[in-house]
Image (spheres, rainbow, N blue to C red):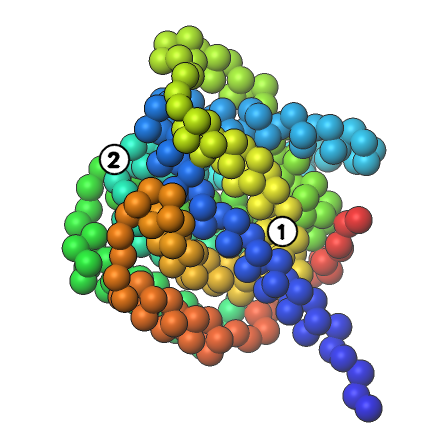
Amino acid sequence: MSTPDPSSSAAAKGMAFGLLAVMAFSLTLPATRLAVAAFDPVAVGLGRAVVAAFPAALLLLLTKQRWPDASQRKRLAIVALGVIVGFPVCSAWAMQRADASHGAVVMGLLPLATAVAAFLRAGERPGLRFWLSSIAGSCTVVAFALSSGSGKLSPADGALILAIMLAAMGYAEGGRLAREIGGWQVICWSLVLAFPFILGPLVWLVSQHGFAGPASAWGGFVYLSFVSAFLGFFAWYHGLALGGVARVGQLQLLQPFFTFVAAASFLGERFGWKPVACAALVALFILTGRGKPLRSPWFRREPRVAA
């Protein structure tokens, strides 16, 4: 009887955690749409991080985590710039000007951006099959956007593209760092370290625009604060550390289609058969593109899964 390949088992677990995170993140744009209907978009983007920083700090204290060293703090700053500040603020601004279903289509480009960031920052060198399948999946998303009339560039599209670039940077750096300090530690430390820098601007924004709204807006904000900004990253960075940034990141090709369902359920946005057909095609690309990613010679650190 042959023994299981440990690396294969870790990769499978990484994909499972990645899929769980993608499903959690798929509600981010609909929840943002609900929140920015009443609140200032920049306040929403910063506020979700401020709220999430409290349970993050408590968890770090209770588990007595070691303070990151100087090099790790610099890399955590990159994570914070990408996923704590950059993506939330840009996507919130965009969601005040575009439907969640439109944003979901543009976000279909995130996996390719993540793969490029993984190549540049995480030392991963996916094979040709991976690149071809990732590009094909991204092109499928773009083709869907064009066929549905959602492909015309607008200021909201520009903000979403900037959000994609920032998120990809944060994903790649966080996935790399998770191999050293653990997945949930990455997001917790990023939130805590960003807190003193974003609290002041948030207080000023709230004093200028207020923060009062209906239950639906508060519901969206609560989801953003505790799932999109906090718990979802537990699974995401753990999955990236186990399965590789580029390969697990490719699961994001499915995220737009989960978002379509959420947008229809919570916002009343309509979609037809095309998203379902595209989702099936994208899933096929994910399956055909799976392969063991190579690593650059300078990136030899083995994954460490923290408790």
Local crowd size for mark 2, using a 10 Å CA cut-off: few (<14), some (14–19), many (≥20): some
Residue lying at 59% horizontally and 38% vertically, measured from the top left: 230
Q: Residue type at mark 2: give it.
A: Arg
Is 90 located above or below residue 247 in the figure? above
Direction from residue 114 to residue 293 in the image, left or right: right
Is 208 located above or below residue 127 in the figure? above
Image coords of residue 127 (percent x, y): 49, 74
Q: Which mark is residue 31?
A: none
Q: Residue type at mark 1: give it.
A: Ala
Residue lying at 43% horizontally and 13% vertically, measured from the top left: 206
Is 115 located above or below residue 134 in the figure? above
Is 276 located above or below residue 195 in the figure? below
97 or 185: nearer the viewer? 97
- Answer yes or no: is residue 81 visible: no
Direction from residue 155 to residue 60 in the image, left or right: right
Instruction: Report the residue that reaches farthest toward the top.
Output: 207
Residue lying at 19% horizontally and 46% vertically, measured from the top left: 153
Q: Which residue is mark 2?
A: 97
Q: Which mark is residue 235?
A: 1
The kind of secondary structure element at disc 1 is helix
Direction from residue 68 to residue 163 in the image, left or right: left
Image quarter of residue 243 = bottom right
Image coords of residue 86 (percent x, y): 44, 35
Image coords of residue 147 (percent x, y): 18, 62
Image quarter of residue 69 = top right
- Give me the C-alpha separation between circle 1 and circle 2: 30 Å
